[in-house]
């Protein structure tokens, strides 16, 4: 049974939801394919994984260089553990990731 008053109230509620749009866009979406913010494990600064430059190491997989402390993940003890690597999602593959290190998620 449809109650017209309730429908109207619901519409009002939906309209007033636009106030929260700013808040929502300010928060970074993890599904945003244009960027993937991660925290550097060394200096804790947050940077965009896709925009960060690749390091010059090639084994087992190059890693990204933190723009702040300029360290890559290759020297990290966990980086050589293959069970910590996952198949890269399509969004990541478009940015050159064949595999994805868990700390990059
Ligand atoms: Zn760093
Ligand atoms: Zn490296």
Image (cartoon, grey):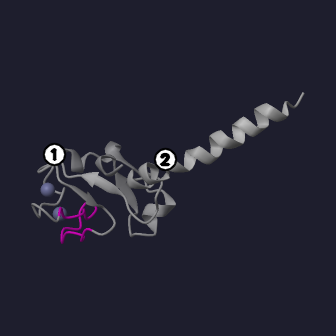
In the image, what residue occupies the spot 46% across and 58% down?
A: 32
Element on which disc 2 rests: helix
Relative depth, front residue between 93 and 49: 49
Relative depth, front residue between 52 and 55: 52
Residue 72 location, quadrant: bottom left
Relative depth, front residue between 53 and 32: 32
Q: Quadrant of ligand 2?
A: bottom left
- The N terminus, quarter of image: top right
Residue hosting label 1: 77
Q: Residues within 10 Å of mark 1 (few under 14, many from 20)?
A: few
Residue 96 location, quadrant: bottom left
Tell me where residue 40 appears, x and y as whole percent: 19, 52
Tell me where residue 25 appears, x and y as whole percent: 44, 55
Q: Nearer the viewer, mark 1 or mark 2?
A: 2
Which residue range is magenta in the image?
52-66
Q: Is residue 60 magenta?
A: yes
Tell me where residue 28 appears, x and y as whole percent: 39, 53
């Amino acid at each position: 049974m449809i109650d017209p008053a309730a429908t109207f109230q619901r519409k009002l509620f939906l309209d007033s939801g636009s106030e929260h749009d700013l808040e929502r866009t300010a928060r970074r979406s993890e599904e945003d394919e244009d960027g993937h913010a991660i925290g550097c494990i060394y200096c804790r600064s947050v940077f965009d994984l896709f925009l960060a430059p690749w390091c010059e190491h090639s084994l087992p997989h190059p890693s990204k260089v933190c723009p702040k402390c300029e360290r890559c993940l290759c020297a990290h003890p966990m980086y050589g553990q293959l069970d910590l690597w996952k198949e890269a999602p399509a969004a990541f593959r478009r940015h050159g990731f064949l595999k994805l290190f868990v700390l990059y998620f």
